[in-house]
Amino acid sequence: MRIFKEKKEINSFLSDIKKAGNTLGCVPTMGALHSGHLELVKRSVCENNFTVVSIFVNPTQFNNKEDLDRYPRTLQKDIDMLSAAGCSVVFVPEISEMYETDTLLHMDFGVLDKILEGEFRPGHFNGVATIVDKLFSVLIPDKAYFGEKDFQQLCIVTKLAEALHKTVEIVPCPIVRESDGLAMSSRNVLLEDQYRKNAGNIYNQLKWAKSMKNILPAIEIKSKVKEELNKQFRVEYFEIVNPKNFLSVENFTDSDDSIALVALFAGKVRLIDNIRI
Ligand code: AMP
């Protein structure tokens, strides 16, 4: 497995690989890898001749300095896991390599970057889009793998690729969960015991919401789930939306497809999850 820190070097290495007729899959991550990340890597390894994983804790997508400072960093362990998973190339740039100047692109994603995560984490999706744009420009993958756990991010990246990186196919990957249902996340190691013990209830509530689809009106499901989760956590939002346009679903008959999305604080740790309804 080759490890690169510089854009120029990895770009030239990967260009040669592609010129030789190989396909390239890419998995952008912020490290502190877990089995959720590895599922993306394994899928890419299956579907491409070469897989490149980037590990970069992207400062511009953090709207909270404390969250950035506390973000887990486990580089050597990550590299060992990637090597065992069959990854071919790792890109671990320094901040100065990705942000030579402090100029940031500002992109407009319509309603998508203004509601839910966009509302509670101002600037977050602009930071995500900026780094994904930079990574795609350097790595030029054929396919890029993103988890459905970050559903809104997946939609933003899909729009970004449609607009600026048409040759990159975005591949959505299902959410990987712990045995109690908690969606795997690099931040889970930061959970205090009492919150970790109850964290399976987040998924239980999502499943309950799904089971109530044709039994209770959406508005009642939303208020009951919020009430339940607020007993143990601090809910920022629990919403049921149409995944195509992110309009709030008030009445299930208006939308054949819907998704319930939640963000909450478990102590100091912010968690997100979702379920198709
Ligand atoms: P992150 O390192 O948190 O930026 O995540 C890197 C990629 O892994 C993103 O596309 C995430 O959506 C994906 N990912 C993170 N956790 C999970 C999970 N539990 N299941 C599936 N994909 C995940």
Image (cartoon, rainbow, N blue to C red):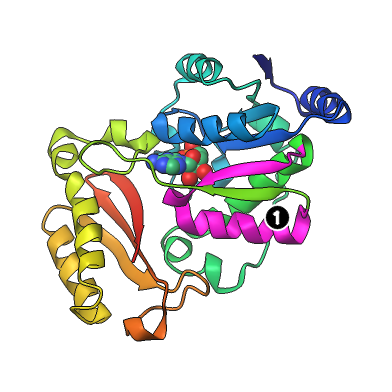
In the picture, the quarter occupied by the N terminus is top right
Disc 1 residue lies near ligand 1 with CB under 8 A:
no
Magenta span main SS: helix
Looking at the rendered structure, the secondary structure element under dot 1 is helix
Where is residue 68, by image quadrant?
top left
Look at mark 1 in the image and give the residue it sits on.
Answer: 161
Is residue 160 magenta-colored?
Answer: yes
Quarter of image, res 188: top left
What residue is shown at x 75% (from left), y 33% (from top)? 23
Q: Position of residue 196 (x, y in %)?
A: 19, 38
Task: Give the x, y percent position of residue 40.
Answer: 52, 36
Which residue in the rendered view is the most extreme toward the front? 46
On screen, 220 above or below 3?
below
- Can residue 250 be seen? no
**In the rendering, at what x and y percent does residue 174 appear?**
44, 47
Q: Residue at x 50, y 19 (%)?
A: 75
Task: Give the percent coordinates (x, y) of residue 232.
Answer: 13, 52
Q: Residue at x 73, y 39 (%)?
A: 141
Residue 135, visible in the rendered structure: yes
Which amino acid type corresponds to the residue marked 1 in the rendered image? Ala
Left or right, residue 57 beside residue 247: right
Q: Quadrant of residue 135?
A: top right
- Number of numbered discs visible in the structure rendering: 1
Q: Is residue 109 left or right of residue 18?
A: left
Q: Please state the extent of the stretch shown in magenta in the rendering.
A: 140-166
Q: Nearer the viewer, residue 159 or 234?
A: 159
Q: Quadrant of the C terminus?
A: bottom left
Residue 93 magenta-drawn? Answer: no
Q: Residues within 10 Å of mark 1 (few under 14, many from 20)?
A: many
Residue at the image point whose x is 20% and y is 40% from the top: 180
Who is closer to the viewer here, 91 or 252?
252
